[in-house]
Structure formats: C-alpha cells, structure tokens
Image (cartoon, rainbow, N blue to C red):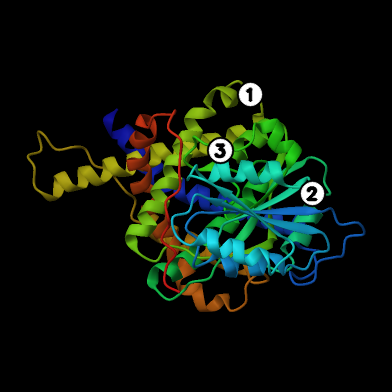
Amino acid sequence: MAEILLKALSAFCFGYPFVLAWYWITGGLLYSLVYERHRPPQDRPDALPSPPPISILVPCYNEGDNAEETLAAAVAVDYPDFEVIAINDGSRDNTAEVLDRLTSRWPRLRVVHLATNQGKATALNTGALLAKHELLVCIDGDALLDPHALTWIAHVFRRGNVGGLSGNPRIRNRTSLLGHLQVGEFSSIVGLIRRAQTSYGRLFTVSGVLCAFRKRALQDAGWWSPRTITDDIDITWRVQLAGWRVIYEPNAIVWILMPETLRGLWKQRLRWAEGGVQMMVDFFKPVSRGRVLSLLPTYLNFVVGILWSYAILFDLGASLVRAFDVPASVALPTFHVPGWWGLTLVLTYLTQALVSHVLEQRYERHMLRSMFWIIWYPLAFWMISVVTTVVAVPRALLRPRSERTTWISPDRGLR
C-alpha cells in the first residue's frame, strides 16, 4: 500500500506541472483562435465611433524618481476623452512636490494628497470616488502606458458583462540575468496563463500594474479592501463573485520595472503567494457554496498547487535524508521517478516556449533574443513557486486580518 501511495505521489509531483503546461498551451491557442486571429496589429486599433471617457488612476508612494516619466506617458496616450488622477499616498520623498509641479504643465492631470500612507487600496478607492468617469484604468507609479492602450480597453468594455480587465505588462529593464528570466516569465507563463483562464471562463488575478474596471462593478464588489495583502487578486475575485466577467486584453500594453536582485524578487513573489493564500481562505465559503461555479476550477487549481509545493518539499526532505546516510529504520520513503519524466518536461517546456513566442511576437519585437531564457524560465518558475508557497501559507494564515496593509517601496531593478 505504501508503495502505491509513493508512486501516486511521484506521479503527482512530476505530472502536475506537465498537465498544467498543456492546460495553458491549449487555452492559450484557443484564446488566440477566438479573440486574436482576426484582430488588426497592436499599433492599429480600430477607431471607436463614440469612445467612452476614461479616468486613469495612478496611486503613488515614494515615486519621486518615476512619477514624471509615468505621468508623461499617461497624458500622451492617443485617446480623445480622459483624465489622469495621481494619488500621493503619504510619500516620504519628494513625490508631492513633483506631482504639484506637473499639474501646471498638464491640464488633464489632477493630484490628490493623502496625509499618511494608508495603502494602495485606499489610494485607489480615493481616486475612484473622485473620478469623473465610469471606466477606471489603474496603473502603477512606475508604469509607462502604450499610446493605444485606452482604445483597446474601451473596445473590451463595449461588452456589457465585462466588469474588469487585465492588461499586458512588458518588462523594461533587461540588463541582468533576473531581468532576462522575467522577460521569459511574462512571455511564456503570465500571458499564456491569462489567455487560458479567459478561454476557460475566470481569471485568477488582474495585473495590478495595469487593470481597468467599471465603477458599477467595483460598487457591487465593495471596492478595494485596505486589509488585503494583494489588492489585485482580492478585487478580481470579488468582482467575479459579484457576477461580472474579468478578462485579459493582450493589446493593452504597459511597460514596467521589475526586481533585479534576489532579495527584491523574493519579497515580491512571497507577497504574491501570501495574497493567493489569503484569497483561498477569504473566498472558501462563497466558492464552496457554488455562488459562481465557473470560479471553482481556478480555485481548485490554486489549492492543488499548494499541495504540490508541499509534496515537492517532502520529496526533497526524503532525498536529503538519503544523502546523509540516515539509517533505513528512520529514513523517510522516497519517490520512484520514471527516468523519462525529465525529457518529457523539457520537451513540454520547449513546446510552451515556442507557442508563447508565436502568440507574443505581435506584441513585442525581437523576442527571439530572449528565447533562451523563455525556454528555461518554466523550471525557475516552478522552483520559485514551491519555496514561496511553502513559506507563504503559515505567514498568511497567522497574519491578523484586522491589520491594514500599507506600502513599501519595491525593488525597481537596474535602469
């Protein structure tokens, strides 16, 4: 019996990433065939006969070095009717002075100053309540909007059941190994996952660096929660539970800065993992009661991913016991891994990279330069997922839920 269980656990450890990769590949190709096949190139969106007005919200905390560049790109987008609202969330640097100076240069820009750092969720809620328009586009304080992003977003919201949208982040800083690996991540993992989830019905999360919502959907969802670790994951689930669709729009491009130090990457990914665990706890009751049945596969996939991470940890522990020659009477059992699994996963990751290249090349030129990193990133992705998930689960479960989440300045990489 123990032998059968070990073989089943072994199949789970090596089969889960294999099955999920093909799940993503299939969903990504389906999305491409249905939504992208007959679209114009990214730099030529169809003109809208009556484009809806849009409010761009830019929450800022200690963005003195980035605010001018970000807001310059925002006010220069190719769209007829929009406003930009920058929310200074109690910054401790010169963000307030920079924002006030820019208001005299750009009439579309409005600035709101909060006296203390109250967190990104509160900053977004403040901006949303002050916004003049129904459609809200939210970007980070270091993000550069593509000139045509608003037009693509407006196209999506012509569908009356869409309450939220995730944009397509592209990496700006590529001067280090971590930078190149993250180019691979956003090309071969993130875009493919969001295409697949849109095809299958429900998104796990919008991209916090570029997302868009209807005010009505936010009202139905209860707005952004100031007590969540990751506001983007939390609001995505609450908008969908309120009966709205949240989808991915790859043409809505934004250029972003990502961590290029191990410490910065670790802090970012641990926060993402904690936010996922918090979502799993917070939304267990509504999902288990079947309020939105189409969310169940996305929810279960996250739960299975946590179990997989601990299964991998168990396997590594057993391997260490064996490596240190612990007596057999106290040694942990070890998995029996078929020798062909390694080659199977390598071929799968290669296929995933090639499919991603085909799907993403229309959004970013010269992707072949990053193909080497795209091929190898899935391995790094799974290893990072294991470590951050194992650490995040107890942290998220033990974290006081009454605690308000405030900002920290993230690692923005090498410029």
Q: Residues within 10 Å of mark 3 (few under 14, many from 20)?
A: many
Q: Which residue is label 1 attached to? A: 290
The answer to whether residue 16 is above or below residue 69 is above
State whether residue 335 appears in this view.
no
119 left or right, relative to 112: left
- Structural distance between the alpha carbons of marks 3 and 2: 21 Å
Q: Amino acid at mark 1?
A: Gly
State whether residue 324 appears in this view.
yes
Q: Which residue is label 3 attached to? A: 234
Q: Residues within 10 Å of mark 2 (few under 14, many from 20)?
A: some
* Mark closest to the chain's N terminus, 3 or 2: 2
Q: Amino acid at mark 3?
A: Asp
Image quarter in which the N terminus is found: top left
Secondary structure of the residue carrying tag 2 is loop
Q: Are marks 2 and 1 in contact (CB under 8 Å)?
A: no
Q: Which residue is label 2 attached to? A: 157
- Structural distance between the alpha carbons of marks 2 and 1: 26 Å
Q: Amino acid at mark 2?
A: Phe
277 left or right, relative to 311: right
- Structural distance between the alpha carbons of marks 3 and 1: 18 Å
* Mark closest to the chain's N terminus, 3 or 1: 3
In percent of width and height, residue 61 lies at 50, 54
- Choose mark 2 or mark 1, whichever is in front: 2
In percent of width and height, residue 254 lies at 62, 64
The answer to whether residue 52 is above or below residue 144 is above
